[in-house]
Image: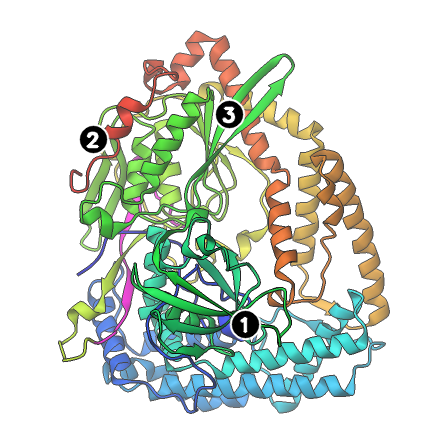
Amino acid sequence: MPKENFMKLRTVSLALLLAFTVGGAQAQSAADLTGGTAGGRKASSLPLKPTLTEAQAAQLSARFLTRFHYDAQPLDDAMSARIFKAYFDALDSEKVFFTQADMAKFAPLKTQFDDAIWNQDLSGPFSVFNLYVQRAVERMSYARELLKKGFKLDTNESYAYDRKKADWPKDQAELDTLWRERTTNDWLRLKLAGKSDDDIRKTLDKRYANYIERVRQLDGEDAFQSFMNAYAESTDPHTDYLGPRAAENFDISMKLSLEGIGAVLGVRDEYVVVSQVVPAGPAAKSGKIHAGDRIVGVGQGADGAIVDVIGWRNDDVVKLIRGKKDTTVRLEILPADVGVDGKHEVVSMVRQKVSIEEQAAKKKIIEIKDGNVSRKIGVIDLPTFYSDFGARREGDKNFKSATRDVAKLLGELKQAGVEGVIMDLRNNGGGSLTEANELTGLFIDKGPVVQVRDARGQVDVQGDDDPGMAWTGPMAVLVNRGSASASEIFAAAIQDYGRGLIIGQPSFGKGTVQNLVDLDRFASRTKEKPQLGELKMTIAEFFRINGGSTQLKGVTPDINFPKSGDEKDFGESTYDNALAWTQIAPAPDYKPVADLKAYLGQLQAKHDARATKSPGWKLMLDELAQYRKMRDKTTISLNLAQRQAERKDQEALQADFRARHKAIDGNSFADDRDGLDDGLNANERSLKSEQKQEDDAKKAADPQLEETAHILFDAVGLIKGDAKLAAEVLPYGGKFSPNATAAATTEAKNPAPGTR
């Protein structure tokens, strides 16, 4: 049956396989995303072939998509053509593997993918994937051969690296030229970073060899996942197919917990390595597992045979390590500080439930001083609208919930004496619809929050029925282009009620709701349960309580911050098949609780004046301008002298940025921010350097958050200085005291499951 509504943004990439084909760097798994007894995968045997289970899953998915999708469309020749384009975009978006001859060979499939799904014959889609694997290995092998010959670096050639709109190479010769240019650029990047020719050759040869190994490990499940996502996302941008493994990981991302050892795993060369140890998990408590340790074997139970996992895919090792709570797993470790011939250690751990606190709500306090006045502004950073649906349904009083966590943090901020609260939703891609509704309820007395219209046109108004507020004082919501879906519901409701200021950049523009459909529940039962996966399907559209929609347009801030320049490539409006913007009638009983326009002009003027004088704000604008300039480039010179001159200019610019950062931040780590390309992929850098970069980023000044706190500081000052203004801009005429304790409302705002 369908599961709870949620609106998480782009949880599954069409190019799932890229997590493995770029050398594994992007294929980090939240800890113990591990367990089970399945074997690992070395090189897959070609050709890959679809299974009967996959064919059944495809047909069953089509039945749902053509009947129950919010914008149900027939699976016919027209849809087949869209799937065809999406599939090739997923596999070869830069057009560096297939040629025009390959595309001509596959042209008949444009009108056959619909038949392939209905007839449970996926040989066509798999033939495309098989050729992709073959071409990828061929191209990387060709690049390795080029390394032996060296490159001419004094030509006037350039490399067009943005090929999304390019034509397919017309023949093998043109493809060879393209790959010579790509490989030359890889060489130049490392040379400009100061590497010797011998080091460059070794680094690139290893990179390409690792790429080949990862591609060869792609299997039928990867092929099927890629094809099915091409179909799902051809219906609308936010419908996805999740295979069994992807479905499990999505469930973990929503409930922020899993059963395992508490270690984040990544890939370095042929090893799966520990990238991070999760505090308080079994790995951390053992005292024997550290970042950088290489996992060479995994054993089940106290005395089960240890399986050699060198060269395995990350997700297969993860699958071995993850398992049921209170069961034992043994890891054979090659410690980070020893060579490849060093002594191995075996560490035994009992799997436990591990919380992924990195994605949970967090708080901090910013103290703003202006003249003789000092005020504390509370900040709650919410990365996602998470909820443990299963624990909630089962009546667990301590189920993981974004709303429950935020309510607790609000109480702590009130006790600390903050005078304003910022909800930081930057890059929060969404999550649970229920959580978006209930979180809004912490900031209003009661009333509608969101309107949801289903495929039949019926509108359901959802809202907060419990009186009381967890926070009654001034508030702001900080958003950017990455704030989507549930974030937009919350921000829109706060804006429509006049409850708080919306500050930042226009949000993503995702106005649709998805449900998870467990396909196994609808399959015919056999002796062995089929593993058909899940369908994340768009089943409704949500609307603001004022009747408008966030679809395509997003939420427009009351006070705008500079745009990053990502709008043309990132956001709902960039999808060709996004739903159109519409509107409906306002929600019954909707009535604003305050009018922030009464002081919005004053706040804007104060912000503008401050931004003009702020060194940090000016530095942010200069860095944004440089970022936009660099990202707008689509070609790059392959002439060493020209690249060296460009590098020298970049070094001077980055030196200036570093000096300005140090003057503003007052931190010595600003000296380490060179901002220059080192020519390496993420998995080629040391874990220590990556961790240092992450730590430094956390210490760096955040001018947008600081300015938002200043704006809220100004708002509090205006409110305190004008009782009439306070009655206009505070909720419900200011009848709720900002200093009231949250204890009385926290329980009411977090009812037991099933009461709403």
**What amino acid is labelled 2 in the image?**
Asp
Q: Earlier in the sequence, mark 2 or mark 1?
A: 1
Which of the two marks, 3 or 1, is nearer to us in this view? 1
Residue 344 tag number:
1
Coordinates of residue 726 in the picture (x, y in percent): 42, 13
**What amino acid is labelled 3 in the image?**
Ile
Residue 701 vertical placement versus 613 (above, below): below
Q: Can residue 588 be seen from the camera position used here?
A: yes
**What amino acid is labelled 1 in the image?**
His
Coordinates of residue 643 in the picture (x, y in percent): 81, 66
Category of crowding for the residue at label 1, using alpha-carbon neighbours closer than 10 angstroms: few (below 14), some (14–19), many (at least 20): some
Q: Earlier in the sequence, mark 2 or mark 3?
A: 3
Q: Is residue 326 magenta?
A: no
Q: Which quadrant is home to the N terminus? A: bottom left
Category of crowding for the residue at label 3, using alpha-carbon neighbours closer than 10 angstroms: few (below 14), some (14–19), many (at least 20): many
Residue 648 tag number:
none
Which quadrant of the figure has residue 268? bottom right
Q: Secondary structure at mark 1?
A: loop
Which of the two marks, 2 or 1, is nearer to us in this view? 1
Q: Can residue 243 be seen from the camera position used here?
A: no
The magenta segment:
530-552
Q: Which residue is mark 2?
A: 465
Coordinates of residue 145 in the picture (x, y in percent): 69, 88
Which quadrant of the figure has residue 173? bottom right
Q: Disc 3 vs disc 1: Cβ atoms closer than 8 Å?
A: no
Q: Which residue is mark 3?
A: 377
